[in-house]
Image (spheres, rainbow, N blue to C red):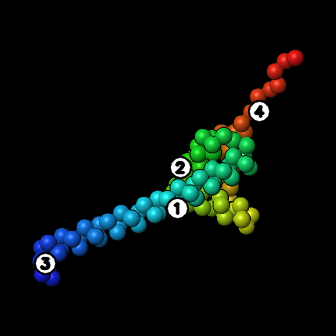
Amino acid sequence: MAPGSRESDSEDDRVFQLEAEVQQLKEAVTSHAVVDQAIGMMIALGRVSPDQGWAVLKDVSQHTNIKLRYVAEMILLWGRDGEIPSEIRAELEDALDRHGPTQIPEAPPE
């Protein structure tokens, strides 16, 4: 294959395309992990179920017009340093009020 040939260009394009796909997959895995960790914080701190934790993050994202991944990142930072933007905190509190806390089933009657 001679440099500059159509076949070489096609292979270069394919390699470039595959490299871009790999990068997108890496970003998706990282984003998924961040969101999962933030859901875990909602479960622990908000006493909600995993589905409710997901709904809380979604609500905060939609009501603040901030991408869900960035909301999740801010929540994780809040867990580490105790600071969160007031707009996010207020919306988070509202969303937790709407979706939780999960009620613990009562003990069966004796």
Q: Earlier in the sequence, mark 2 or mark 3?
A: 3
Marks 2 and 3 in Cβ contact (< 8 Å): no
User: Is 11 left, or right, of 79 in this rendering?
Assistant: left
Foreground: 94 or 99?
99
Residue visible at 62% across and 62% down in the picture: 74
Q: In which quarter of the image is the N terminus?
A: bottom left
Q: Which mark is residue 104?
A: 4
Extreme residue in the right direction: 110
Residue visible at 74% across and 33% down in the picture: 103
Foreground: 94 or 57?
57
In three-dimensional space, the C-alpha distance between marks 1 and 4, rounded to whole angstroms, equals 33 Å
Mark nearest the camera among 2 and 1 is 1
Q: For the residue labelled by badge 3, is the local secondary structure a helix, a strand or a loop?
A: loop
Q: How many labels does the image show?
A: 4
Q: What residue type is labelled 2?
A: Gln
Marks 4 and 2 in Cβ contact (< 8 Å): no
Residue 98, position as x, y percentages in the image: 66, 39
> Quadrant location of residue 89?
bottom right
Foreground: 58 or 63?
58
Q: Residues within 10 Å of mark 3 (few under 14, many from 20)?
A: few
Q: Which of marks 3 and 4 is nearer the N terminus?
A: 3
Q: Residue tagged by mark 3?
A: 1
Q: Residue tagged by mark 2?
A: 62
Q: For the residue labelled by badge 2, is the local secondary structure a helix, a strand or a loop?
A: helix
Mark nearest the camera among 2 and 3 is 3
User: Is 1 left, or right, of 26 in this rendering?
Assistant: left
Q: What residue type is labelled 4?
A: Ile
Q: Residue tagged by mark 1?
A: 30
